[in-house]
Image (tube, coloured by chain):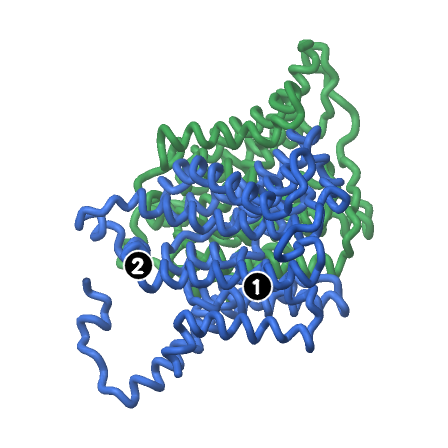
Amino acid sequence: MSTQLLISAIILGLSMSGIYFLLTVGLSLCYGLMRMISLDQFLYYALGAYMVYTIKTLTGSYWLGMGGGIIITLIVAFIIERLINKRVYSKPVMFSMILTFGVNLMGVGLIKYIWGLTPKPVASPIGGSLNIFGTGVPAYRIFVICLAVVVYFAVQLFLNKTIVGTAIRAGIDDAEKVEALGINIKRLFTLTFIIAAALSALAGAIHAPFVMVSPEMGMSITAFAFMVVIIGGLGSIKGTMVSALIVGQVVSLGAVIWAPLAEMAPFLVMMIILLIKPTGLYGSKLASR
Amino acid sequence: MKRYLTGATGIILVFVLLYFLKGVLPPAFLTEVVIYSIYAMGCSFLIGCLGLTSFGQPAFLAFGAYGAGIYLYYFGTNSYVAILVGMLVSLLINMLVGKFLVRLSSSYFTLCNQAFCVVTFFLFQKALVKWTFGDNGLLLISRMKPTPIIDLTSSKGFYLFAFLVAIGVWLFFYYLTKKSVFGATCLCVKDNELKLRFLGYNTFNIKWFAFVIANTVAGLAGALYTVYFCMVNANIASVSSASEAVAISMLGGAGTLFGPLVGSFLFIGLKDIVSQFISHWELLVGFLLIVVMLAGQKGIVGSLEEYLAKQKSEKIPPAPALTKEGGL
């Protein structure tokens, strides 16, 4: 294996890790605070990508599309949370999973209805390539990696330094006590849910130039997102980051060795980690419930 | 009357009635309904009796389908043997995979199942492409010879055979869930696993055994599917159809005897009718799933049973609180 191939595979893996992280951090936050597995995050991911496509064709600006996509997804997520999801917080995980899967399925149907079945291309907003150790790497991939790192630190700062973030962390530990302190936990749930949705939409928007935007894109990334969440452990931001890095590298390096390995190797990694630690790398005791 | 309708005679009666519906409805539709209901039976059993939701059912369907398909393509010509081989392959794989998956808690179980489904899809589409021909699939129509007793290669013969298999599966599940100790322990796992373990049962083995049974039935449905359509391709394991089994189970009512049948009748009927007008059946199925979940997750048969029980309990004085609360 040549060095150039290796370097470009590692960079590709890192950018995939960035996208996986943005997508799964929402899932992880939702599980941590509300004890629900929100499968409709994949709908917001697809919606973000479609909004980028639509706004870019209308106005010609990718960045406007990204911003608009996030804002529209925020509104949609808020409506869905108010109408449907708030009813499931007190119920078992299984309940929220099937219900949000229904939401996801309905969303896929709506997307097919509005945009049709044909995959749509989105051009990369940053052209050109950077030279890293003598290997040409598309600049957009570097941008994706930087964005994921910025979001990671922003989420950590939000959770650790702001008062709302502290309340969310306290809620992850013990929701009842937080409520007893006089904090409106319902509002906290809504806030966390729309933050998660916005991050998913961002993931969709930055993933759009890599892949064709198609109605099934949310479905096809589901399995990788699940593997990231399971390896990292549900409800842990740090674990999500570490396992996104692992899965991204396994996917891209696996593809270099033998193409079908790319999709199957993360599953083997997941199985081995689950055999050693059934709650994932950073999963706490709450995940075993 | 209720006693006859829910017992073994009721099962045979329902299927005989359904069999003669072929005068009204197209037999191709009814065959598909029966195959899907066998497929959903396993999923419904897992959700309703064990509290394990599996979004990876297409994987287990695919192992049965490819077991039968590969046998027919490379080794033999007999469809009966192909169905047996399909079941056997899925039995062996379920026994192996179950050991890994059943250890997990319920939320991890669901996520891992779907991940396993994707891996299976890529296994058949890319990794084994030399033998399975990926998306083109195995075409078996010239490989299948007419079989004795019931000719599985003719659509009439297959129609009868599918009904016989369905009656067998239903009787099996009826005695398993309603009459055996094993069925009672399964329900107990769902309600209070810790208590069952305290009583000295090995809950891992119970869950593992139930997982193997449920998914081998899915494999049987897959083998029937292969023989019926005379072909199998990688799309059978695609993730986008992962919802189907769960949707059917929830629509009909998970854990009820006739839930999967009613659910698949409705699901395939709606899919056929809706796709004549708009090509996006997901919209409707998703909507129905949300409605069923918000309306109390009992499904059609489950709600009906509850209604009948309420009618009955108005005539008879209520039972003591201890049994009603489910105290052991």
Q: Quadrant of the C terminus of chain B?
A: bottom left
Q: Residues within 10 Å of mark 1 (few under 14, many from 20)?
A: many
| Quadrant in the rendering for residue B143 | top right
The residue positioned 41% from the left and 49% from the top of the image is A164
Q: Percent position (x, y) of residue A78?
A: 54, 60
Question: Of the residues under marks 2 and 1, which one precedes in the sequence?
Answer: 1
Is residue A60 visible in the rendered structure shown here?
A: yes
Q: Which residue is mark 2?
A: B180
Q: Percent position (x, y) of residue B322?
A: 17, 71
Q: Which residue is mark 1?
A: B163
Q: Specify the amino acid type for callout 2.
A: Ser
* Residue at mark 2: chain: B
Chain A, chosen colour in render: green
Asked if the residue at tag 1 contacts the one at tag 2, i.e. Cβ–Cβ closer than 8 Å, the answer is no
SS at circle 2: loop
Q: Specify the amino acid type for callout 1.
A: Phe
* Residue at mark 1: chain: B
The residue positioned 41% from the left and 63% from the top of the image is B255
Q: Percent position (x, y) of residue B298?
A: 43, 69
SS at circle 1: helix
Q: Percent position (x, y) of residue B9?
A: 43, 73
Chain B, chosen colour in render: blue
Q: Quadrant of the N terminus of chain B?
A: bottom left
